[in-house]
Image: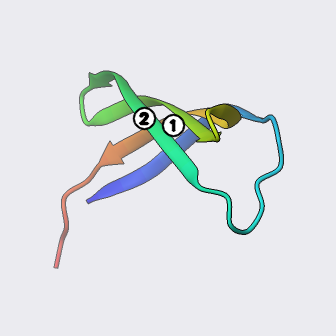
Amino acid sequence: MYYLAGVDNARFKRPVGPGDQLILEVRLERIKRDIGKFICEAKVDGQLAASADLMCAKRGIDL
């Protein structure tokens, strides 16, 4: 299971409305221990709508 550990450099460039097709592009920048850093962009009609750097932590499930 992965948990959202952090959001950095979040930028919102343009509004997105109902009916817009939002394309998400995510690139893995690095993995260190069990934490991955991802560069994320959201685009509408080829134009950048939002971007952010996300960190996700991998954790085991204890049941």
Q: Secondary structure at mark 1?
A: strand
**Would you name the residue on which mark 2 appears?**
26
Q: Nearer the viewer, residue 44 or 53?
A: 44
User: Disc 1 designates what residue?
Assistant: 54
Please give the name of the residue rendered at 16% of the width and 79% of the height, measured from the top-left corner. 63
Q: Residues within 10 Å of mark 2 (few under 14, many from 20)?
A: some
Instruction: Please name the residue shown 61% across and 33% down the image.
Output: 46
Image quadrant assignment for residue 35 = top left
Q: Amino acid at mark 2?
A: Val
Rendering coords of residue 61 (x, y %): 19, 67
Crowding near the residue tagged with mark 1, few <14, some 14–19, many ≥20 C-alpha atoms within 10 Å = many
Query: Is 25 left or right of 62, judged from the image as shown?
Result: right
Do the numbered discs 2 and 1 sit on residues whose CB atoms are within 8 Å? Answer: yes
Give the image location of residue 39, x and y in percent: 49, 27
Number of marks in the rendered image: 2
- Dot 1 amino acid type: Leu
Q: Nearer the viewer, mark 2 or mark 1?
A: 2
Give me the residue at 28% from left, 25% from top.
Answer: 31
Real-space Cα distance between discs 2 and 1? Answer: 10 Å
In the picture as drawn, the residue positioned furthest to the top comes out as: 29
Q: Using the rendered image of the protein, determine whether residue 8 is visible from the camera's viewpoint.
A: no
Disc 2 element:
strand
Question: Where is residue 22 drawn, in percent x and y?
Answer: 58, 52
Left of 36 or right of it: where is 1?
Answer: left
